[in-house]
Image: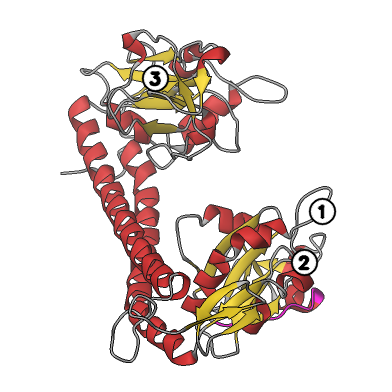
Amino acid sequence: MSKWPVSSLQGKLHIKHGYPFKGEYFSDVGDYIVLTPGNFYEEGGFKRQAGKEKFYIGEVPKDYLHNKGDLIVAMTEQAEGLLGSCAFVPNDNLYLHNQRLGLITAEPKLLDRIFVYYLFQTSSVREQIRLTSSGSKVKHTSPERIYAVTAPLPKVEEQRKIAAALSALDAKIDCNNRINTELEAMVKTLYDYWFIQFDFPDKNGKPYKSSGGKMVYNSTLKREIPMCWEDGALDDLGQIVGGSTPSTKKADNFTTNGTPWITPNDLSDNQGNKFITRGAQDISDKGFKDASLKKFPVGTVLLSSRAPIGYMAIARNEVTTNQGFKSFVPTNGYSTAFIYYTVKNSMKVITQYASGSTFKEISGTVLKTVKVCLPKSDVVEQFTNSVEPIFKRQDTLEQENQQLAQLRDWLLPMLMNGQVTVS
């Protein structure tokens, strides 16, 4: 039972539909980015997708330009779980939103804007929005239906305390994510510098190619590579393994505490992270035998090979996968780190080799033949030793974020109901 009085949102906030944009004014470049459900996500902001963003070059009324921190709500269910999601606008006067989104303005004496963001993440509010939505193919709601939503609403002073507590957790998660992004850029730059530009440290500690290191033309790779390096294929990096799915008709094939079983959907949900512990479901011992599965060791590089191709993660512990994977078990002296970035660097070729009428897939046979340059073992070892502390730091930050998110999600309903209060 809620400690706070329950009332509707009517009169406490206002939702403004987006601008009716004219198609002829959309462009690949421009001054204003049009926010759509396609670049909207739940974690408090918007994702920018170069080459996929819609820019508007027509005249727009000034009151449709956004200020940083404006709160936007998804009015359509373009993707599962999207309806009723909220996100904050990241920049001033750069973004507009289309009619499938709404701008929320809260009455400051009745509702705190940041509190509203968290309120719309509660299962009660989201369920009310879902139940009152309409549409046969794509569900949608309206401002009037959202105004009718009821929720426990403390006084605005208490709302600000609740919002501050939850925001502190999200701010720490965001900080960790930004640190990991910078760390990832550092490792990727180092890999490119050593294995693409061939400026790894020579015996004197100087960049090899730039310092006159001998290069030889390789007819297989059709380019020059350092002397004593070889041409090879992804198959040389380690054992490439697939997975399987136990019969879904047998409920006892699955459990909540068995062998972690990873699917491409799990990697989709894991985007932004480098490591993975488990997916949405575990496999029981019975299911493991039913599908003739094999356990893959810590450090296995998981690669989704269909629906879609190219999601990647590193196994934090023993895992197994479904058939939508071609994963790399390090067995030939190449480290997890080197395999991870070499596969990433080969992704363009991998996707070009994919085939299929219903959906594209890369077969294990074809994947094994993708050509790569194989460096000397001492260079790989030096690279691995250089990036190992960064990998450990990234892993620590990812696990910390998982704990923070669990704490936030645990606190959210209790704070909103007044079961827990902020002093």
Earlier residue among tags 3 and 2: 3
- In the rendered view, tell whether residue 87 sits above or below residue 283: above
Q: Position of residue 238 (x, y in %)?
A: 62, 83
Pick the front one: 55 or 217: 217
Q: Amino acid at mark 3?
A: Leu
Kindly report the distance in space between the C-alpha atoms of the residues bearing marks 3 and 2.
46 Å
Residue occupied by mark 1: 356
Q: In this picture, which residue range is highlighted in magenta?
A: 290-297
Please tell me which residue is depicted at 79% across the width and 56% down the height of the picture: 355
Q: Which mark is residue 363?
A: 2
* Dominant SS in magenta: loop
Instruction: Please tell me whether mark 3 or mark 2 is closer to you in this view.
Output: 2
Q: Amino acid at mark 1?
A: Gly
Residue occupied by mark 3: 103
Is residue 8 visible in the rendered image? The answer is: no
Q: Report whether 9 appears left or right of 293.
A: left
Q: Position of residue 125 (x, y in %)?
A: 46, 30
Q: Report whether 254 appears left or right of 421.
A: right
Kindly report the distance in space between the C-alpha atoms of the residues bearing marks 1 and 3.
42 Å
Pick the front one: 222 or 185: 222
Q: Amino acid at mark 2?
A: Ser
Instruction: Please tell me whether mark 1 or mark 3 is closer to you in this view.
Output: 1
Please tell me which residue is depicted at 22% across the width and 19% down the height of the picture: 108
Please tell me which residue is depicted at 37% across the width and 23% down the height of the picture: 31
Pick the front one: 260 or 124: 260
Q: Classify mark 1: residues with Cα within 10 Å, few (<14), some (14-19) or many (20+).
A: few
Kindly report the distance in space between the C-alpha atoms of the residues bearing marks 2 and 1.
10 Å
Q: Position of residue 372 (x, y in %)?
A: 60, 75
Q: Secondary structure at mark 2?
A: loop
Q: Position of residue 368 (x, y in %)?
A: 71, 75
